[in-house]
Amino acid sequence: MRLENQSNVSEFLLLGLPIRPEQQGVFFVLFLGMYLTTVLGNLLIILLIRLDSCLHTPMYFFLSHLAFTDIAFSSVTVPKMLMNMNTKYKSIPYAGCISQTYFFIFFADLDSFLITSMAYDRYVAICHPLHYTIIMSQSICVMLVAGSWVIACACALLHTLLLARLSFCANHTIPHFFCDLAALLEMSCSDTSLNQLVIFTAGLTAIMLPFLCIMVSYGHIGATILKVPSTKGICKALSTCGSHLSVVTLYYGAIIGLYFLPSSNNTNDKNIIASLMYTVVTPMLNPFIYSLRNKDMKGALRKLLSK
């Protein structure tokens, strides 16, 4: 399929963030610092997990993939946003826009599935500690991660192929800082009913179903804690649950508020803020609220610095 034949537009214009021109420099420095923190923080997590044999466990296996996904997820949109903040002509080629949409959906869904896998790992560790090594074997962990990649790829590819078949109207201006799927569908002159249907069904599969699985996992965890309070093993297993729940709240809260709650007439600025939350803020905070507060990660960091 040749993308040029599917649309009468060669490029789009990204309006970017709703900030004043005199504020561009301040926000450029702010978001550049946040992006560099995201990349360096998550790279540090991957490095520590790879170098320290004590961190070669299922939980940190999932965490290393989550760290890589956060780097890639943020890199899909932030570098282009930063570049547009320093240029007058904020265009993006049609093929580049379609590609950005694909990778955005892919890494967003992959993030969701990996967070769900981590919740399942915590559930097994707390609710079935005696069978943990059997249930969370290396083959199961690899299968969960591989399945996350395959399903995320399939969902993103489905959305992208359906988007590539659409034609667009004379207005090629996207009121966003990246090629958001919902914004592109609003600009289309074609029938988007199939696209909307797929967004709803795929959204249930990639967002709501994992979210429900996480809630069920923590429901069982809570019930187990109430049955056996104050045991040393459970306290150790619960050491990362608070941080994981913070990640879940940040990630799913922004996405559910953006895509699943009813919207009013003037919500574009709110949509951009919500998008910034889960594309810029959450990937930056993950190394801090999930990993660097963990005793095992702190120990691995001390070992690395002592060398």
Image (spheres, rainbow, N blue to C red):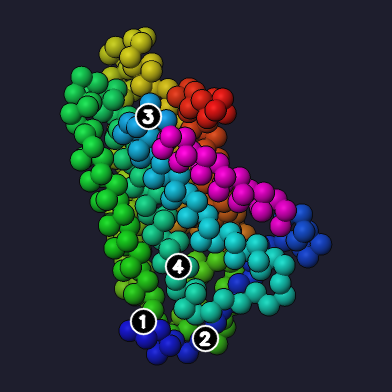
Q: Which residue is mark 1?
A: 165
Residue 297 marker: none
Range covered by the magenta-colored residues:
28-51
**Measured along the vertical axis of the image, is residue 266 above or below residue 138?**
below
Q: Which residue is mark 3?
A: 53
Q: Find out whether the residues at labels 2 and 4 contact each other: C-beta distance under 8 Å.
A: no
Q: Secondary structure at mark 3?
A: helix
Which of disc 2 and disc 1 is earlier in sequence?
2
Give the x, y percent position of residue 203: 35, 57
Q: CA distance from mark 4 to mark 1?
A: 14 Å
In the rendered image, residue 175 lying in the magenta stretch gets the answer no
| Residue type pointed to by label 3 | Ser
Of tags 2 and 3, the one toward the viewer is: 3
Q: Which residue is mark 2?
A: 10
Q: Find out whether the residues at labels 2 and 3 contact each other: C-beta distance under 8 Å.
A: no
| Residue type pointed to by label 1 | Arg
Question: Who is closer to the viewer here, 124 or 173?
Answer: 124
**Measured along the vertical axis of the image, is residue 67 above or below residue 160?**
above
